[in-house]
Image (cartoon, grey):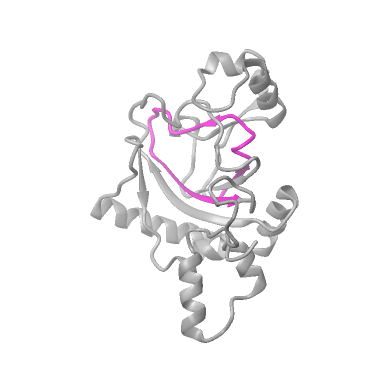
Amino acid sequence: MAEAVEEARACFADARRSGGANPGKLFMTTAKLPRALDSRIMALARHPALLKLIGRYLEGLPILYRINLLDSANEALQPESSQFFHVDPEDFRQLKVFVLVEDVHEDSGPLHLLRADASDEARLARGHRHGRVPDAEVMATAPPEALVACTGPSGTLAIGDTSRCFHFGSRPGARRRHVVMLQYLTPFASVFPLDAKAAASKYADAVRQRAERDGAPVSEPDAFLFGLMR
C-alpha cells in the first residue's frame, strides 16, 4: 500500500508540472500512470486479497476496467456533474476502490456514499433511472446516518458499489483531494458489447502485446481480469 501511495504522489507531482486534463469535469484533473502494467498501483489492484473480496461481492471474477488518478481542486460546483447525487450506469453492480493518497477530511470534498438499502428506497420513491438528483430528494427517505463520508488518513481504502449506491464527491472545500480509483465491473457491463467474446479493459491491448513479446500465453486469471475472455 505504501509503495502504491508514493507512486501516486509522484504521478500527481508530474501532472502539476505538465498540466492535466479531465474532459467534462472542470473541477478535476487526471494524472497519468506510466508503465501501468508494471506499476505498484497495478500490483495493488491485482492483490489476491482485494480480488477475492471484490469477486465475492460481484459473484464471479471481476474485470479491472480502469485505474484513474484523480486530483480534485474543490473550488466550485459544476452543474449536472458528479458533484451531485447519482449512480453510475456502466453495470447493474460494480465496485470502485478509492485509495486516499493524502489525508482526506470533511473539508477535502470527500466522496459520499449513501448506504445501499437507503439508496434502493430513494430510487424507488422517485422512480430514478439515471441523471443527477438534488440532495433534498435523495435524503427525503434516508436517515442522516446512512450517508457516509469517505474520509481518513493516507492509505485508507474506501470501497463502494457506485451502480447501486447514490454518491457524490469533489464538492467545494478548503483542501485538494488526491485519490486513486480502481474500477471493477462484471462481464455483463453495458460498456461491453453483448456479442463480443472479450470484454476488454483499458489494459487489454497492453496485456496482449506483452504476451506476444514474451512468447508466452496470457494466464487464465489475467485473461479474465483484463477482459480478454468472458
| Quadrant of the frame with the N terminus | bottom right
Magenta includes 179? yes
Residue 211, horizontal then vertical, whole percent:
52, 79
Residue 58, horizontal then vertical, whole percent:
71, 49
Residue 73 vs 5, above or below: the answer is: above
Name the residue nearer the viewer: 168 or 153. 168
Residue 77 vs 202, above or below: the answer is: above
Left or right for 222, reference 18: right
Q: In the image, what residue occupies the spot 61% across and 68% down?
A: 223
Q: Is residue 38 visible?
A: no
**Which residue, as the protein is rendered here, is positioned at the far front?**
195
Left or right for 185, reference 111: right
Name the residue nearer the viewer: 184 or 20. 184
**Which residue, as the protein is rendered here, is positioned at the far bottom?**
215
Magenta includes 105? no
Instruction: State the extent of the magenta-drawn residues as a range.
Output: 155-184
Name the residue nearer the viewer: 100 or 186. 186
Residue 10 vs 99, above or below: the answer is: below
Residue 141, horizontal then vertical, whole percent:
67, 15
Residue 217, horizontal then vertical, whole percent:
59, 80
Q: In the image, what residue occupies the spot 53% across and 29% down?
A: 86
| Quadrant of the frame with the C terminus | bottom right
Q: How many marks?
A: 0
Q: Quadrant of residue 47?
A: bottom right
Q: Is residue 220 visible?
A: yes
Residue 30 vs 137, above or below: the answer is: below
Left or right for 37, reference 122: left
